[in-house]
Image: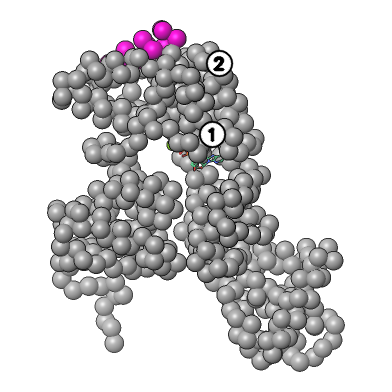
Amino acid sequence: MNIYPENFRWSLPMKNNLNVNIDKNFNWEIIQKELRNQFGNEIYESWLKKIIFEEKFTNYILVSVSTRFIRDWIVSRYLDQILGTIKKFNKEIVRVEFKIENKLDIEKKDTFNNLDTNISFIKDSFLQYNRIDQNKSFENFVIGESNKLAFEASKKVSENISHYNPFYLYSGVGMGKTHLLNAIGLKLKEDKKVTFISAERFMYQFVKSIKANEMVKFKDNFRNTEVLIIDDIQFMNGKEAMQEEFFHTFNSLIDKGSQVILSADRPPNKLIKIQERIKSRFSGGLVVDIQSPEYELRLKILKTKVDELNILYSEKLKLSEETLKFISNEIRNSIRELVGALNRVASFSRIYNRIPNLNEIKIILKDLLSINETNITIDNIQTLVCKYFKISKNEMLSSRRSRYLVRPRQVAIYLSKILTTKSLPEIGREFSNRDHTTVIHSVKTVEKLKNDNNEISNGINYLKNQILYKKENEI
Ligand code: ADP
Ligand code: MG
């Protein structure tokens, strides 16, 4: 009998629950940054960021992720390269071990990691500087109620330089600020000298220039630009001297009619560690925000991204309307997360050569979904369907063929097929050992009924929601 709690381990040092490394020679944050640089933001955000460092052993490290699917995907696609990166910093590591950990505090760790990353990024960041992303233009920016104003303002700025000066765009993370800034940069780059830089990089350049005695070059560099775009200005919390320099650069640019464009995660007056006079200059131009994306916009973005993927890849991704609606409904907070979710579903389809069903999608996106963990079982489905049709479970599982029993049985079989990962014979077995051909017949019948009969179709949608969202008590 195991007398120790499940996670008990002998003689290990107490682990710091903030995921800070105990081994001074091993720095996961540096490795993460390097991974971000190597794989690019999209892959990093969708997959690698979720890897949580647990412990370092003599020649291997232990990391955790929240689901098996994420582990398998990372292992099959990226592990070699990840190990290569780790080896660059720690030669002795020859292996990475994964465990699946679904702790509630993973979220907390994530937040901590984020904060930490943001702060220390400056040190040795390879953040792209003046590298405008060709793929983020006005043309592929999808517009909805929540971002229409920001989009229109950005267009105006790109058409009418120095009319709205500075232009200050703010929103929470992953809402499209960098995309819009890029779009402006792309447009203006056609005939203007554009400098596009993150605030972190600005500070980094600044400090580097001081050290190298190259302040003149630094100043010239920035003061000669016709359009200065600084992304994520909230990270500009440098020393007085730096703010001083920034303030002068900023003023001289505006005075000579250059356009200054800024983004941040909050309005100017809420910025911290930034001098009042700078904040007040930020507020002096056009200040616009992007609001949380509404359902329609989320759905439209998903559809656009599916179309984009289908141009890129020969195997077409054919997601049902239902799947797209499910994802749009579930992932509400950030467009980056929404796009990341879609990428995961697309990855799944590519490895397994088929579209995941809703239950599988729930597993794939588990860590992004707000709904409670529901373990969808056939038994559960039968119970809910019986309640809905007001029949007993015995009746449903009996061999009687009265019409009032056949229909609910078929619906339950259909829902078991689309909402679980069970095979046809497995489903048959749970319905009193019915043959798998009966299962196929039921699925086909219900699919047809759904198309022809509104009442049935509504009933099924209702049941599906009950099952997915566990709202039994509302029945
Ligand atoms: P932020 O800078 O606000 O954190 P980003 O501009 O980096 O957000 O956007 C996150 C991701 O979502 C990017 O891949 C971006 O291209 C995409 N995205 C955001 N808004 C839109 C939109 N309206 N249409 C299409 N893609 C969008
Ligand atoms: Mg951004």
Q: Magenta segment, which residues?
A: 244-257
Residue at the image position 75 percent from the left and 79 percent from the top: 442
Name the quadrant containing residue 349.
bottom right
Q: Nearer the viewer, residue 276 or 82?
A: 82
In percent of width and height, residue 396 lies at 73, 84
Give the colour scheme of this rendering: one colour
What amino acid type should be assigned to the residue bearing mark 1?
Answer: Ser
What amino acid type should be assigned to the residue bearing mark 2?
Answer: Asn
Q: Answer left or right for 418 relative to 279.
A: right
| Direction front: furthest residue | 314
- Mark 1 Cβ and ligand 1 under 8 Å apart: no
Q: In this view, does 255 lie above or below 227?
A: above
Magenta includes 351? Answer: no
Q: Quadrant of the N terminus?
A: bottom left
In percent of width and height, residue 328 lies at 61, 51
Residue at the image position 26 percent from the left and 60 percent from the top: 83
Q: Do the residues labelled 2 and 1 touch (CB within 8 Å)?
A: no
Name the quadrant containing residue 325.
bottom right
| Residue 266 shows up from this direction | no
Name the quadrant containing residue 291.
top right
Q: Answer left or right for 280 relative to 301.
A: left
Q: Answer left or right for 228 relative to 218.
A: right
Q: Where residue 330 is drawn, which disc sits there? A: none
Magenta-highlighted stretch: main secondary structure?
helix
Q: Real-space Cα distance between discs 2 and 1?
A: 17 Å
The residue wearing badge 1 is: 137
Q: Quadrant of the C terminus?
A: bottom right
| Direction top: furthest residue | 255
The residue wearing badge 2 is: 160
